[in-house]
Amino acid sequence: MTHPPKNPQKSPPTRRSTAKPSPHRKAGQAGAGAPPANPRTVAIACQGGGSHTAFTGGVLQALLGGIDPQHHRVSGLSGTSGGALCAAVAWFGLLQDKPALGATLLESFWQEMAAQQLPDAVSNQFLVWLQRSSAWLALPEISPYQLPPTGQKYLAEVIARHVEFARLPALVKPASPRLLVGAVDVLSGQFEVFHSHHASPQKRIGVDALLASAAIPELFRAVPVGNGRYWDGLFSQNPPVRGFLSDVAERDAKPDEIWVIQINPDRRADEPRSTSDIADRRNELAGNLSLRQELFFIEQANAWLAKGWLSAEHFKPVTIRYIRLGLDLDYPSKLDRSPAFIDTLLAEGRRAGSEFIRQLAAAP
């Protein structure tokens, strides 16, 4: 495994935690034993976080190859920003009933996103250095509207090479896995969820919807979709979760479980004191605030259902499990696309995803 270059201001990444899935029935190897009786349906929610979501790509690779179809079936994915891009690539494989294809496409996607060529590698290192130097180096702020949208155009091209949007109308069936993508309308402040099964074609999944979800305001211009102008979904639903339940009337159509691939840490061991550490923690808390709001909806419904305050005819308890990024990383590294760093995150994601599957199978 390759490793990212050491951050001169921070120590190398160290693990904070490992995935701790809740107890559940034991899962065996795919294809073993009796045919699937009634596998539990799973929605996978992918939090945004820039380059850190290469970890998400690795986790999804492990899940796509390791989920036992006798016990679990992926009924939907959601994501915001980089999480949305990973979810979309995996979803495209699942639409074709080819999870292995999704895993292969995820690897290809992140290898293309890595700064492989010399000019790109130099500009990537310079951008990360600027972010890490902002606490002591005064530089003029530059609007993305003052620069050509080269990066956004390249991202659109990479996405289109991994998701064949022209094929989606034929591939998306009523029973197909759903994909939810979060963004926010810059002008109205309206939170938007682009949906693979939306009644309006403008609100379905397309390259513009994915670009909108990944439009970090400091780096990219707002993306026009229909009558809206959209930014990164960090400000809205990071990632969308409620839509898996609130937009579904039938009880059996709601997922039994939601697996959250979480990029930002809930806790820090030490109080942030330097300006860079304070900025890091503010970014983490902002990303987790919308996630916690999304999950509170489900936790509250579970509690009310247990008390008999909700009808079991339309609601059911939903298990929430987490797969968390366990590396100690700073905010500027979310912009780092160096190949070594991307490879490290992909490998860590595969490790965490495989460990999650192992613990799920070992549970009583």
Image (cartoon, rainbow, N blue to C red):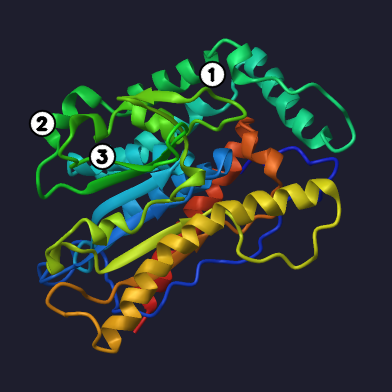
Instruction: Count neighbours of disc 3 (C-alpha within 10 A) and say few if under 14, some if 14 to 19, many if 20 or more.
Output: many
What amino acid type should be assigned to the residue bearing mark 3?
Gly
* Residue picked out by circle 1: 151
* Residue picked out by circle 2: 170
SS label for mark 1 = helix
Instruction: Count neighbours of disc 1 (C-alpha within 10 A) and say few if under 14, some if 14 to 19, many if 20 or more.
Output: few
SS label for mark 2 = helix
* Residue picked out by circle 3: 93
Residue 108 location in percent, x, y? 42, 30
Mark 3 and mark 2 residues within 8 Å of each other at the beta carbon: no
Mark 2 and mark 1 residues within 8 Å of each other at the beta carbon: no
Q: Nearer the viewer, residue 142 or 277?
A: 142
What amino acid type should be assigned to the residue bearing mark 2?
Ala
Q: Nearer the viewer, residue 221 or 92?
A: 221
Closer to the camera: disc 3 or disc 2? 2
Closer to the camera: disc 1 or disc 3? 1
For the point 54% across and 47% down, the residue is 347
